[in-house]
């Protein structure tokens, strides 16, 4: 068998998945004469690029028609993965954590599922709860409420009522935009009310956002900039925001 370089091998793997719709790691390892770990890394890379979907023991063809949430999850994916890796460094065993809705927070939940910390996670996000559902040492409190299907989030009166008597050590919140004039904004009013409530019940509030969110304003205001304790982002933060964060005593990581 001809020895393939990594790019040629991944291209061949992708062609095989497109043709057969699903593949197994053990079979690919045999077919290409490399270790299962090498194939596993190939599949993870293709999955991160949004080309295929990695599943336990193999991979499947990613459907051509993804829903809105899945499409957004693949946008700025490298940045979201980097943010998630930074975010989980702030989590310690014994904490009660709020993880809000949004695709960046989903990546935080996935990264958290790989750690050994024993924590309790409170969330209004079905994908976040699903990412942690079968993970040891992670207790999950899924808030009830009305389901917004495009976001897979729960909100409304029942969600706010469930949050009423829950207090958390640390909370991770996403946003639709960050503006010096408008503050932190997002797209859905009902979801924003839950985020506000969650922020008010967290000892430390962390905003997570890739740098495409700077200088954007969406429909509903979530909070002023000085409401947050820490911003975790990716790439370069605009100088004017660095000055504003310093003035407002907001820490930041990029």
Image (cartoon, grey):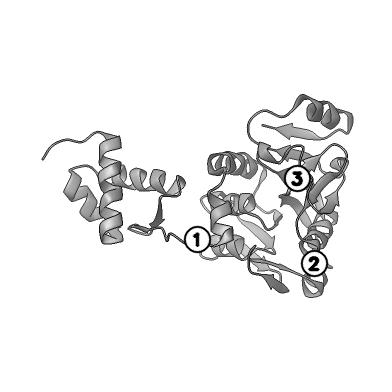
Q: Residue furthest left?
A: 1
Q: Which residue is mark 1?
A: 66
Looking at the image, tell me whether mark 3 or mark 2 is earlier in sequence order: 2
In the image, taking residue 18 as reference, residue 30 lies left or right, namely left
Quarter residue 165 falls in: bottom right
Q: Can residue 138 be seen here? A: no
* Residues at marks 1 and 3, CA–CA distance in whole angstroms: 24 Å
Single out the mark in the foreground, 3 or 2: 3
Name the secondary structure under disc 2: helix
* Residues at marks 2 and 1, CA–CA distance in whole angstroms: 32 Å
Q: Can residue 209 be seen here? A: yes
Q: Which residue is mark 3?
A: 177
- Residue 204 position within the rendered picture, expressed as x and y whole percent measured from the top left: 79, 47
* Residues at marks 3 and 2, CA–CA distance in whole angstroms: 25 Å
- Residue 20 position within the rendered picture, expressed as x and y whole percent measured from the top left: 26, 60
Looking at the image, tell me whether mark 2 or mark 1 is earlier in sequence order: 1
Q: Which residue is mark 2?
A: 163
Characterize the local packing of mark 1: few (<14), some (14-19) or many (20 or more) Cα atoms within 10 angstroms.
few
Q: Which mark is residue 19?
A: none
Q: Identify which residue is drawn at 83% across, 57% down.
A: 196
């Amino acid at each position: 068998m001809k020895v393939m370089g990594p790019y040629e091998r991944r291209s061949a793997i992708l062609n095989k998945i497109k043709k057969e719709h699903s593949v197994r790691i053990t079979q690919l390892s045999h077919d290409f004469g490399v270790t299962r770990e090498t194939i596993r890394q190939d599949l993870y890379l293709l999955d991160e690029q949004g080309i295929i979907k990695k599943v336990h023991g193999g991979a499947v063809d990613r459907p051509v028609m993804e829903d809105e949430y899945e499409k957004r999850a693949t946008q700025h994916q490298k940045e979201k993965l980097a943010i998630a890796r930074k975010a989980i460094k702030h989590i310690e065993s014994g904490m009660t954590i709020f993880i809000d809705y949004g695709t960046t927070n989903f990546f935080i939940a996935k990264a958290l599922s790989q750690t050994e910390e024993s924590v309790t996670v409170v969330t209004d996000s079905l994908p976040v709860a699903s990412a942690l559902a079968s993970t040891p040492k992670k207790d999950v409190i899924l808030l009830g409420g009305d389901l917004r299907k495009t976001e897979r989030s729960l909100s409304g009166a029942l969600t706010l009522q469930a949050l009423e008597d829950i207090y958390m050590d640390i909370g991770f919140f996403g946003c639709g935009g960050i503006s010096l004039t408008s503050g932190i904004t997002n797209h859905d009013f009902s979801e924003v009310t839950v985020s506000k409530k969650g922020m008010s019940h967290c000892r430390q509030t962390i905003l997570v956002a890739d740098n495409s969110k700077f200088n954007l304003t969406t429909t509903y205001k979530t909070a002023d900039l000085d409401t947050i304790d820490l911003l975790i982002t990716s790439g370069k933060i605009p100088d004017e925001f660095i000055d504003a964060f310093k003035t407002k005593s907001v820490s930041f990581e990029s």
